[in-house]
């Protein structure tokens, strides 16, 4: 039984906070930038005013990261736990505050992406080079972003052109026969802005599965990947305060993986075929945003996204998701410190798969009302959303957040909210598994926290609890399934309840060119019906990093620690990854980079029977017309 008791972990919590607060505060204060985020209210808002737990990952952080992928970046910066069937390029998932992979909404430039059959975004198709900045809202967000935002929401933004022409380029080579290259140009002239980029990455990798796995899937061949991407953002500003934009993006992933086929007459596992996952992600959007008056700003976006996956060995299976979306949003400025947001969201999802006899479709219409106001030292955020879905009916969710600036350095905040997770198409219709009467998961969440900033020292802490009922999962008892012989091995079902609770602590200290940073997550994710820890959730995860800049040199290192976690009847051991980097700006616009990931060559088993990469060295050159 896994019970998170703050008394039990108090020494760890106090120790982590003490590490921050005992640091000297005598360093000269430097201006702290206050990023503008939209995930708190759906409208631009200074991060300092948000009542939600939001992590902003800026362009410089992404450019300078020691992460090997988008998934690895998110777990380092946002405290999300990562599970992946091997190394970079392999399919995987992530847990935000212990919520399942399909309990987080992912948007790219405002467009929802991912597989509607699996119910999750496939980050393995994305390259870090495609991204300008990321927002991660941890905690309940269904009242703003609808179904599946139980754990939170990830907003990914690509680059938008501004100012004189800017050329960026990057090329890298690394261990495991890895190569990366990307090129982008952006800028604006007159009323037009543009940003275009493209790139390719590939790696030979290693065998994704360890020898002697439980299902006979091990194949000693290397499971590498190739990934190609291209994207464009174009905009036109006919008058100040009005912009019309077009966004287009396409990525293609070709990744090898290990699996097995069970063919007659022996039906013994055959792992020899060349198993591959071909995944194409596309999106296109047209949007308008304009100030119709001093009191009214309107936004309109019409978009389509496609997630097309074909995978297998000698026999291929195809799953294709098409999403058509329209969003009409209005921000009404009631006063300089108060805003009302009204929005309508239309979403139509269609799935084509060879396991379905016909296309599966559903349509969702949603109405959203949100309010944000500042009253002296207090900030208030409230939102309410009603969804009507053609398959699973009506759902209404809400949230209420409050923060108080107790002193100039210290802010206190609290947030409550309700959530729901929609059944996936697999849950509803997959042959011999799906059940059409599956109900959405529903949750209630509460969190409290503080943020403290004094000169070059900062710290924050959040305590949270999320109770979820009607968990959607596998029911192995056929007697609990519909009376149909097709369910002789079980079915999808609303199987139970879960409690997700924990604490997130962060701290940062700067002394001149030296910057220290730490993130610590404690998590108790418990199945309330059995009293056991939910699979693949570690009770703790830590990231500690140090960076030192002197003249043209920047040196850095980080440690990512992940605790033990249960998976498929065994307990996987904890592990720590040490990563090192060095950057030399030999000319104002040119930089050489070197990186060593998993420097101690630790054995990593991200999920049972799979293995991550060992030690990997990289060397790269980067050009930025704006300089470093």
Image (tube, rainbow, N blue to C red):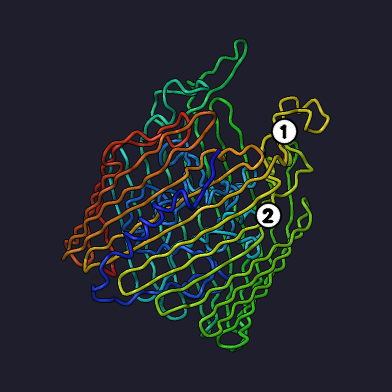
Q: Secondary structure at mark 2?
A: strand
Foreground pick, 377 / 559: 377
Residue bearing the label numbered 2:
420
Q: Residue 337, percent across and down?
A: 56, 85
Q: Quadrant of residue 164?
A: bottom left
Q: Residue 187, percent across and down?
A: 39, 72
623 vs 188: above or below:
above
Residue bearing the label numbered 1:
491
Graded by Cα atoms within 10 Å as few (under 14), some (14 to 19) or many (20 or more), the crowding at tag 2 reads: many
Residue located 27% across and 66% down the image: 510
Dot 2 and dot 1 residues touching (CB under 8 Å):
no
**Would residue 253 be seen by someone viewing this image from the given angle?**
yes
Q: Residue 128, percent across and down?
A: 40, 54
Using residue 9 as the reference point, say whether residue 239 is left or right of it.
right
Foreground pick, 474 / 589: 474
Foreground pick, 80 / 173: 80
Q: Quadrant of residue 605?
A: top left
Quadrant in which the N terminus is drawn:
top right
């Amino acid at each position: 039984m896994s019970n998170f008791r703050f008394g039990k972990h108090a020494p760890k919590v106090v120790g982590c906070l003490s590490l921050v607060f005992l640091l000297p505060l005598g360093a000269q204060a430097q201006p702290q930038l206050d990023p503008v985020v939209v995930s708190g209210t759906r409208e631009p808002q200074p991060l300092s005013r948000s009542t939600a737990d939001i992590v902003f990952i800026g362009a410089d952080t992404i450019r300078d990261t020691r992460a090997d992928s988008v998934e690895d970046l998110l777990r380092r910066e946002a405290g999300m736990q990562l599970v992946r069937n091997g190394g970079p390029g392999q399919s995987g998932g992530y847990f935000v505050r212990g919520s399942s992979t399909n309990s987080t909404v992912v948007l790219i430039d405002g467009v929802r992406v991912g597989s509607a059959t699996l119910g999750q975004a496939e980050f393995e198709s994305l390259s870090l080079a495609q991204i300008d900045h990321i927002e991660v809202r941890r905690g309940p967000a269904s009242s703003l972003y609808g179904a599946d935002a139980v754990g939170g929401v990830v907003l990914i933004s690509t680059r938008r052109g501004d100012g004189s022409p800017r050329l960026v380029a990057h090329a890298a080579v690394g261990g495991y026969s890895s190569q990366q290259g990307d090129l982008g140009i952006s800028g604006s002239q007159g009323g037009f802005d543009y940003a275009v980029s493209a790139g390719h990455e590939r790696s030979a990798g290693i065998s994704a599965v360890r020898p002697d796995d439980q299902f006979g899937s091990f194949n000693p061949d290397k499971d590498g990947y190739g990934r190609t991407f291209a994207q464009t953002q174009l905009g036109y500003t006919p008058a100040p305060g009005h912009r019309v934009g077009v966004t287009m993006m396409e990525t293609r992933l070709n990744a090898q993986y290990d699996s097995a086929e069970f063919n007659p007459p022996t039906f013994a596992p055959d792992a020899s075929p060349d198993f591959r996952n071909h995944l194409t992600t596309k999106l296109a959007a047209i949007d308008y945003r304009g100030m119709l008056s001093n009191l009214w700003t309107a936004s309109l976006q019409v978009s389509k996204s496609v997630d097309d996956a074909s995978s297998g060995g000698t026999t291929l299976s195809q799953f294709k998701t098409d999403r058509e979306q329209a969003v009409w949003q209005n921000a009404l400025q009631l006063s300089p410190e108060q805003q009302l947001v009204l929005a309508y969201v239309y979403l139509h999802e269609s799935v084509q798969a060879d396991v379905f006899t016909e296309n599966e479709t559903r349509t969702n219409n949603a109405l959203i009302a949100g309010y944000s106001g500042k009253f002296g030292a207090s900030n208030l955020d409230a939102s309410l959303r009603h969804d009507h879905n053609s398959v699973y009916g009506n759902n209404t969710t809400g949230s209420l957040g409050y923060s108080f600036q107790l002193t100039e350095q210290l802010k206190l905040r609290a947030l409550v909210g309700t959530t729901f997770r929609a059944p996936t198409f697999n849950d509803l219709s997959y042959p011999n598994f799906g059940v059409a009467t599956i109900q959405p998961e529903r949750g209630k969440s509460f969190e409290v926290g503080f943020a403290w900033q004094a000169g070059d020292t900062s710290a924050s802490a959040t305590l949270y609890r999320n109770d979820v009922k009607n968990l959607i999962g596998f029911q192995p008892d056929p007697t609990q399934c519909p009376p149909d012989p097709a369910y002789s091995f079980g079915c999808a079902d609303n199987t139970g309840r879960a409690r997700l609770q924990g604490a997130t602590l962060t701290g940062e200290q700067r002394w001149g060119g030296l910057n220290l940073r730490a993130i610590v997550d404690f998590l108790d994710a418990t199945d309330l019906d059995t009293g056991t820890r939910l699979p693949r959730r570690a009770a703790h995860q830590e990231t500690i990093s140090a960076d030192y800049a002197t003249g043209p040199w920047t040196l850095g290192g980080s440690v990512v620690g992940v605790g033990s976690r249960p998976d498929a009847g065994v307990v996987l051991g904890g592990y720590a990854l040490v990563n090192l980097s060095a950057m030399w700006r030999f000319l104002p616009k040119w930089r050489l980079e070197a990186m060593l990931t998993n420097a101690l060559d630790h054995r990593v088993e991200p999920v049972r029977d799979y293995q991550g990469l060992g030690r990997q060295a990289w060397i790269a050159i980067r050009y930025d017309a704006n300089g470093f």
